[in-house]
Structures are given as C-alpha cells and as structure tokens.
Amino acid sequence: MACSQVFNWTSDADSSLSEENSPKSKKPRRRCEWSVLRQFENKKEAEAYLKEEGQWIYHCKYSTEEGVTMKYNCRSSSACSAKRRLILKAVSSIVELHATIEQHDHALKKQKGISQNMKDEIVKLLERGITKPKMILTELRKINETNPTTTQLKNFLAYYRSQIHPPIVSLGALQALAENHSQIPSTLDQPFVVHSMFNYEDKSFGILVSTLRLLTITQMTRLIHTDATYKLNWEGFPVLVVRVSDKNRTFHPTAIAVTVGETSTNAWIKQQGTFRARLPMGEFISFMLSQTKDWSEQRDPIHENHKTFAKVPIISLRLETDAFNWNKSKPSTRYKTPEDELNIRHYFVAASGQPPLKEDDVKKYLRMNTNKSWRTFDSYLASTTRLWMVKFHTNQMWTNSTCGLIPHVLVPFT
Ligand SMILES: [Zn+2]
C-alpha cells in the first residue's frame, strides 16, 4: 500500500456546492473524493498544465494548515462532478494536482447559471456597447437556441461589472478615485475631475467632471443651465448635467456632476440599511469621464460632424421679416441710455398682452430688479413679466446685445 500512486482524500472544506455558501442554500453538501494526479515543481507549471487541458475554470481558493488550495470547476458547468484542485504545499514549493474520482457528467446535469461560452458571448456584446439586458437577450437569441433568463443575465451583469469596476465601499475610496482623476490634463479632450468635495461629518460629497475644451466653451457664456431632477440619478444620487446655450440657442453639455447632500445621504442610508453597502460609484465615475470625453471630442473642429459653438447668432430672413413687421406695428417701447455704458441703449418693451408702457412701469421695474426688493413671489413674477429689457449694443457689436432681466439673469438675445 505504501507504493500506491493514488491517495484518496475527503475533506470537509470541499463541496461540489461550495459556490452556494450562503445560508439561504438548503441543498445538502456533497463531499468530493479526490485523488492525486501528479506533482509539479511550482505553481506556474501546475497552472500552465491546467490551462493546456482547457477544461477547467478557476473557482476559488482558501488556506488550510497543509497549504493553499485553489479550486477549479469544469468549464462546461460548475454543476459537473468533475473538478480539479491544486494544493500549494505550505512546507515546500511542490504543487499537487488533485482530481475528483467522479468523471464529467455535465451533459446530464441541468445547467446551473450561465455557461462559460454564454458568458464569453455576453462579454463580447458588452464590449460592442450592447449593455441593456433586453438588447443582450435579443442578440443572444440570434446565435443560440437556449438563453439565460433575465434574472440570470442581470445577476451575471452585476457580477461582471463589480469585477471590472471594483465597487466603492467608502467615501474615502471614492475620494481617492476622484483624486486619481483630478490632475489637469495636457490635452483638450481628456476628461478630469474639475472639482470635488468630501465631508466626512455629514457624509456629503460632490464631484464635477469636464474637459478643458468644454470648460472653455462654458466661459463663452454668462448663463449656465443645470438639471438636478431626480429623473437623472445614479443609485438615487442626483446627477447634474451642466449645459450652456450658444447664440443660436443650441444647448451644449459641458460637465456632469454627482452630488449628495446630507438629507439625501441619510435617506439613502435608511433605504440601504447601511452605508457599508457597496456603491457602484466607481462605475459611474468612469461613465462621467467617458461621457464628457465624447461631448468634448464632438466639439473638436477636426471631428467629422463637429458641433460648433455659435458665438454670433444666425439672422435668418424669417427673423428679419418678423423684426421688420414688429417694428412696423409700432410696439410700446421706451429707452434709456445709461451714463456709464457707452454704445449701449436700454430698450424696454411691453410684454405681449400687457398694456403700453408708462415711465413709471420702467422706473418700478428697474428699482425692483436692481434692489431685488420683491416681498412675495407674486410681486417678483409681476415685475419680471410686465416688460422685457433689451441691452442693445449700438455699435458693430450689436449681436452681443442681450434680452432679459437685470442684473441676476441674462439670456442671449437672438
Ligand atoms: Zn464536466
């Protein structure tokens, strides 16, 4: 017996169902019987041998007194009885390869989860930009007869993404990630974290991502639009998209921010039970970076269908005709020439549906909007909807004229 090449092993730690270690699993654990197949000089050789066989897929590893055990499942199905394991001996560099006594039976076993081949196909689709479960299933149906269920697919996608983008488990990890991307890049379209703030006291944070090109565009206007509705959110965190509009009233997205105030963090903690729950925030930062990069590149003049930021309005014939007709209708207007602003005349125009302007209306408008002396929202509304104020540049720069309120809000005049 001493010369026997084959030793039989059983081990408590091993189970063909070790994948389902969760307490929920009520399936009985089945012990595997192992025999030593061969020995290797080192881990590298052993792994190369298994790879060469092409039938095994790494599953997990754990340590025992004897050494480290690395387990491999059958590539066709983790439910298959055939398995391999490597024992990395604690006392030497020798690595033993063990095999289950049981042979492959994966053809008989009902496939548990998604097969490796299927997983490879899904990953290929993800890499092609097909990321929505419904779309993935549609694509898979074109190539396979049997396909994963929606739940199986969603579980796999969640697992795969957590591997690609390690989840952020703490505010500190999120801050480290933000700081990793906060260096000002040397190229115009390289996205970076323009600003971030972290408050550990109240667990609030904010991260803003943009590119140098998009920031330059932002500087060309005096008005910024943001949208922080909860329709746009990531894991319940409000996402802000910063946009500016050019002189042709075309929107240009220029930055994305994700921000969490105290209240929403608290609500979120309540909802999740604990802040230690894993946030897929790392994935979102990647999204912010790639999205701003796209926006930026689309505004590069050498881009095939590049989007120009109009610095002067296009005056269409239609607009000129409308202006001519409007002027012919002798609208109720008044004007003032400010003493300190050369070449600028302030025109006041009664809003549509409002009676002709009196000198008092203009005075009241200027007084209220300069001193910001509204007492109620109704009086604010009344003061801002009574008339329009046009700051008209009387020189060559007339296209720089603006129309709107003073001095807190200005909208481009076209
Ligand atoms: Zn098998």
Image (tube, helix red, strand yellow):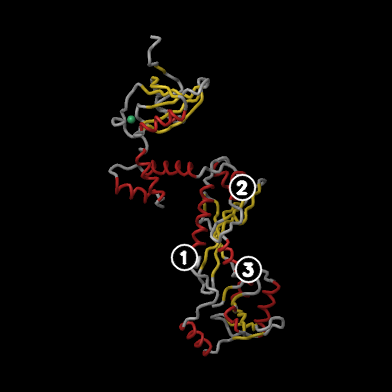
Q: How far is disc 3 from disc 1 in space, using C-alphas?
A: 46 Å
Q: Quadrant of the N terminus?
A: top left
Front position among marks 3 and 1? 1
- Measured along the vertical axis of the image, is residue 387 above or below residue 260? below
Q: Earlier in the sequence, mark 1 or mark 2?
A: 2
Front-most of residues 341 and 60 = 60
In the image: residue 277, left or right of residue 85: right
Callout 3 crowding tier (Cα within 10 Å): few <14, some 14–19, many ≥20 = few
Q: Is residue 23 visible?
A: no
Compute the Cα span from label 1 to label 2.
Answer: 34 Å
**In screen coordinates, is 197 left or right of 136?**
right
Q: Which residue position is annotated with label 2?
A: 175
User: x%, y% of residue 156?
Assistant: 42, 41
Query: Mark 1 = which residue?
Result: 303
Amino acid carrying label 1: it is His
Residue under numbered circle 3: 377
**In front: mark 3 or mark 2?**
2
The quarter of the image holding the C terminus is bottom right
